[in-house]
Amino acid sequence: MSFQTRMADSVYLPGLAIPHSEASPAPRHSAMVRITHWISVVSFIGLVVSGIGILLAHPRFYWGETGGVGTPSIFDLPLPFMLGGPSGWGRYLHFESAWLCVLNGLVYVVSGLVSRHFQKDLALGGSRFTWRFDNDAHRYNGVQRLSYLAVIFVVLPLMIWTGLAMSPAVTSVFPALVNVLGGHQCARTIHFFTGVALVLFVFVHIGMVWRAGFRSRVGAMITGRAAAQKDGL
Amino acid sequence: MSKSFSRRKLMTAGFTAAGGVAGLTVAARLASRYGLIPPDWAGVYGPGETLTYAAQHILTSAHSLAREFSRSEISRVAQVSGEHPQTDPYQSLFSGSFADWRLAVDGLVARPASFSLAQLKQFPSRSQITEHICEEGWSFVAEWTGVPLSYVMNLVGISPRAKYVAFFPFDEAWDSLDMQDVWHPQTLLAYGMNGRDMPVDHGAPLRLKVPRQLGYKSVKYLARITVTDTLKNFGKGEGSSAPEGGYSWYAGI
């Protein structure tokens, strides 16, 4: 429906010779959203790859302050211990990607507040909570909004928090960061499972994009505009 | 019309780029002046490593203390990383109960010295119960006893030109600290663990303890300490053997 209206507009408007600002519909995604989206893709890949590399050195999880070989674990991944392998460059890559992710995230959040992106596109007020996703709609429904808001304002901050809580330098200044979590190994375990949750979110996100029309939606995130033809085929 | 527009655009881009380069140059100068550039700053991971080191160096500059624990929290199991050196001179010193072992302190110092274990034990000591966190992911809490590194540094009289102190063990895993960590009250030359002499697996007879950084900075099996104003002439100039294995010089994470 809205798709047809837009098509009609774009045929009709040039004839009216209305000034250029009116000639094309507003972009689906602002330039700032598009740029920060793709930078976060790069940093996320770096974080996941290096996170796995670090994990391989000791794929066991503990609860509390301490834990290691010879102490009870709460969760063992069925993986061998790879020592002296990918955890070295993994750490370099992890922290460089983390800086990219955090700085990019700051730009996104600040610009999102200034441009009212959060109020316009993600605020929950008046949105419909439904598992029906309208692929042609220019607006997200309540489930989508809640998912994005949770990732941006809950899951990613928890990831940063639990990451910093593992740093003996940072916790020397802010010991509460790790103490309220229940100790160093709690921070590590929560960091891992939060990371798993983020990876699952990305899979669902890509699945939804696929359902809505992969080329058109990815195109919209690159150019800002939806090439609306043949969505979902 | 479009030509002048593109020229204006080009000039704006040019000025922005020039401003960016100038800004970065000034930032690099300032960072270098205030000791915010780690020795392993080069390469593709340099920017991330420099940001981490600079941020945490500033954050921890007021000598914040690593978390300390109570006796009841001392771990029953203390995981060991690696083996003690299997060759001489370490092996013969070990079989002689380290009676002939000496710690050499040299470099930019007024009074180069060499200390026996008995001498080090006579200096004022400090005990602290801190967590040893390995980069692999495991950790344990133990009580470490030793002489604060700052005490030994004052004893030998280090030059105001000193910027780093390098630590050389009997194996290949040498490392170095910046002066902030050298003067930090919890930085110990530790000869005791959990009330006994340092076990051989944990670095006997003497190891460094730097509890604000990951375990691999706490060099085991110490033989020599060198005070220096540059790390360029040690190893590959990256401040430590760690970057050669892919690990960062700074490990406050």
Image: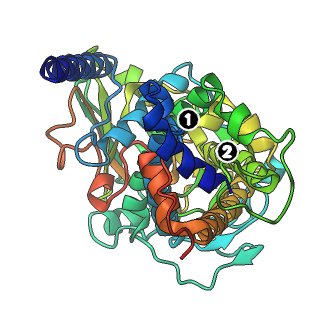
Give the residue type that dot 1 points to: Tyr
Give x and y (percent) for residue B177.
38, 36
Q: Disc 1 designates what residue?
A: A108
Q: What crowding class fits label 1: few (fewer than 14 Cα within 10 Å), some (14-19), or many (20 or more)? A: many
Q: Can residue B200 be seen here? A: no
Give x and y (percent) for residue A167.
59, 44
Please state which of residues A139 and A188 is positioned toward the viewer in this rendering: A139
Give the residue type that dot 2 points to: Ile
Q: Residue at x 85, y 60 (%)?
A: A130
Where residue A119 sits, quadrant-wise, is: top right
Secondary structure beneath label 1: helix
* Inter-mark Cα distance, 1 to 2: 10 Å
| For residue A129, side relative to residue A45 (left or right) | right
Q: Disc 2 designates what residue?
A: A152
The tag earlier along the polypeptide, 1 or 2, is 1
From this view, report whether residue B251 is shown above or below residue A70: above
Please state which of residues B227 and A60 is positioned toward the viewer in this rendering: A60
Secondary structure beneath label 2: helix
Q: Residue at x 61, y 55 (%)?
A: A3
Q: What crowding class fits label 2: few (fewer than 14 Cα within 10 Å), some (14-19), or many (20 or more)? A: some
For the residues tagged 1 and 2, is the chain the same?
Answer: yes
